[in-house]
């Protein structure tokens, strides 16, 4: 199955776009969030390097036209991501503290 191209998707307040290396600090905040871990199976990383391996995987998947993986940005800051879990289901995660200013 082929999804849409890797262009940005713009809404009134949010941007959906491929994940970039400049997003990694924010992505790692999401990976380490205890709130996120309650609803999304993430490993307990033994090191920052292990977490960065997963961040690199997300970045690579967000560039793959056969996958649906996008970073969700507010004010040009990554606050979450949406990704395909299978061909028919999707999951969306946010770093909850980002919504205080919405």
Image (cartoon, helix red, strand yellow):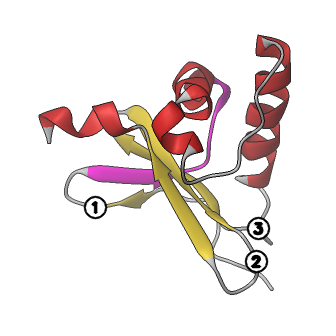
Q: Residue at x 51, y 25 (%)?
A: 26
Rendered view: 1 above or below 62: below
Image location of residue 60, percent across then percent down: 80, 45
Mark positioned earlier in the residue sequence (1 or 3):
1
Viewer-closest of 60 and 46: 46
Q: Residue at x 30, y 34 (%)?
A: 98
Q: Nearer the viewer, mark 1 or mark 2?
A: 2
Query: What label does residue 86 carry, if any?
Result: 2
Indicate the quadrant where residue 12 lies.
Answer: bottom left
Image location of residue 47, percent across then percent down: 81, 12
Rendered view: 9 above or below 96: below
Rendered view: 49 above or below 71: above
Q: Which residue position holds label 1?
A: 11
Instruction: Estimate the spatial distance between the alpha carbons at disc 2 and disc 3, rounded to whole Å.
Output: 14 Å
Residue 61 covered by magenta stretch? no
Disc 1 element: loop
Disc 2 element: loop
Q: Nearer the viewer, mark 2 or mark 3?
A: 2
Q: Are marks 2 and 3 in contact (CB under 8 Å)?
A: no
Q: Please give left or right for residue 46 compared with residue 73 in the image.
A: right
Name of the residue lying farthest toward the front: 38
Viewer-closest of 93 and 9: 93
Q: Which residue position holds label 3?
A: 65
Instruction: Tell me, yes or no, if residue 101 can be seen here.
Output: yes
Q: Residue at x 67, y 67 (%)?
A: 68
* First to last magenta residue range: 14-21
């Amino acid at each position: 199955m082929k999804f849409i191209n890797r262009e940005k998707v713009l809404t009134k307040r949010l941007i959906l776009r491929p994940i970039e290396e400049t997003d990694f600090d924010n992505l790692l905040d999401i990976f380490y969030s205890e709130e996120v871990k309650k609803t999304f199976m993430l490993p307990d990383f033994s090191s920052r390097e292990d977490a960065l391996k997963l961040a690199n995987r997300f970045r690579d998947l967000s560039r793959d036209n056969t996958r649906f993986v996008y970073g969700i940005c507010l004010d040009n800051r990554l606050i979450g991501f949406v990704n395909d879990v299978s061909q028919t289901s999707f999951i969306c995660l946010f770093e909850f503290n980002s919504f205080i200013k919405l």
